[in-house]
Image (spheres, rainbow, N blue to C red):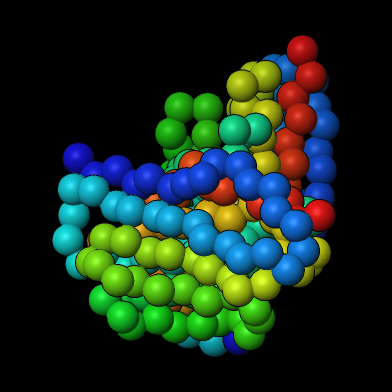
Amino acid sequence: SQTIHQWPATLVQPVGSPLSLECTVEGTSNPNLYWYRQAAGRGLQLLFYSIGIDQISSEVPQNLSASRPQDRQFILSSKKLLLSDSGFYLCAWMGYGANVLTFGAGSRLTVL
Amino acid sequence: AQKVTQAQTEISVVEKEDVTLDCVYETRDTTYYLFWYKQPPSGELVFLIRRNSFDEQNEISGRYSWNFQKSTSSFNFTITASQVVDSAVYFCALSEGSGGGADGLTFGKGTHLIIQP
């Protein structure tokens, strides 16, 4: 069966520090991968999605970036965090033709 | 552009009451998919249902039921005989096109449902 892992679960970082959140999927190949952010009272915002290795689409311009170095690995990064980057980040995957997003457990980021 | 509106920010009911969560969507496509997800306090989103635009049949799954009406662009979710474990944030979502959402889903802002014992 397919599983999705996301870490770290919680992160407290100072303003200006770098960020790396990692997501991996097991039990499937060539999944579509997604990063969403959930800020308080603002629902879920799609940040990036990827249909294959090194193929990244950005939905919202910001100081975040995403990379997909391997088929089932999706990384969310920042060189310098802002206070506004605080939030709950969710990784998700979708199988080809499956049309349903399956989410990881999320990473809660607090920027101080 | 696609848009999902969940006008109810928070709903509080007493256990065993029925409750309906509203969802209104906007899309220019004739082919689209609608979803409901549940987010319990743990944070992980749990898939509940998917409905495509060509299937307007209502669906019932245990205490959960969904009413899809294209005429009013609504996809409402009803919980019958609510229980404390139903307390969560519920999200309605939309994906456009026959591709089935490969470029991601558009979510509403969610409705926080509180079931009081």
Instruction: Report which quarter residue A53 is drawn in.
Output: bottom left
Is residue B1 among the parts visible in the rendering? Answer: yes
Quarter of the picture holding the N terminus of chain A:
top left
The mark total stands at 0
Q: Is residue B15 left or right of residue B97?
A: right
**Measured from the top left, where is residue A41 in percent x and y?**
79, 56
Q: Residue at x 63, y 85 (%)?
A: A61
**Measured from the top left, where is residue A40 in percent x and y?**
78, 54
Is residue B95 among the parts visible in the rendering? Answer: no
Q: Residue at x 38, y 45 (%)?
A: A5
In this picture, is B63 found above or below A27? above
Instruction: Report which quarter residue B69 is drawn in.
Output: bottom right
Q: Residue at x 73, y 36 (%)?
A: B113
In this picture, is A23 found above or below B95? above
**Measured from the top left, where is residue B56 in percent x and y?**
44, 60
Q: Residue at x 31, y 76 (%)?
A: A51
In this picture, is B17 found above or below B10? above
Q: Is residue B75 left or right of residue B115?
A: left
| Residue, far top | B117
Quarter of the picture holding the C terminus of chain A:
bottom right
Q: Nearer the viewer, residue B114 or B62?
A: B114
**Measured from the top left, where is residue A63 in percent x and y?**
65, 79
Q: Nearer the viewer, residue A109 or B43?
A: A109
Q: Nearer the viewer, residue B74 or A85?
A: A85
In this picture, is A51 found above or below A76? below
Q: Is residue A57 left or right of residue A84?
A: left
Instruction: Report which quarter residue A38 is drawn in.
Output: bottom right
